[in-house]
């Protein structure tokens, strides 16, 4: 059974080219790991259910087949 603090704990992600390479609860660890990947950055991981700053909408492409 997971602890109740899981949704409240801050997480950090190492990201390169839009792909998450590593996730950690420690910002220092995430920064150390990002040093191993050229062009990577460290960002705060969004909390579950938090849609701020993200576009989660799905758009459909209309094709005219006339």
Image (cartoon, rainbow, N blue to C red):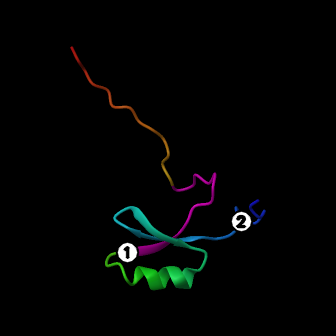
Taking the image as shown, residue 15 lies to the left or right of residue 13, namely: left
The quadrant in which residue 39 appears is bottom left
Where is residue 14 shown, x and y percent of the image? Answer: 45, 72
Task: Please name the residue that numbered disc 2 is placed on.
Answer: 8
As drawn, the label of residue 40 is 1
Residue at image point 62% right, 54% down: 50
Residue at image point 61% right, 75% down: 25
For residue 53, above or below residue 57? below
Examine the residues drawn in magenta and state their main secondary structure.
loop
For residue 14, above or below residue 63? below
As drawn, the label of residue 61 is none
Q: Which residues are magenta?
A: 41-53
The quadrant in which residue 27 appears is bottom right
The quadrant in which residue 16 appears is bottom left
Taking the image as shown, residue 50 lies to the left or right of residue 30, namely: right
Could you tell me which quadrant the N terminus lies in? bottom right
């Amino acid at each position: 059974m997971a602890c109740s603090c899981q949704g409240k704990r801050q997480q950090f992600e190492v990201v390169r080219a839009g792909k998450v390479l590593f996730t950690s609860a420690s910002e220092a660890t995430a920064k150390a790991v990002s040093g191993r990947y050229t062009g990577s950055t460290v960002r705060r991981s969004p909390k579950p259910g938090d849609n701020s700053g993200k576009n989660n909408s799905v758009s459909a492409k209309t094709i005219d087949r006339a």
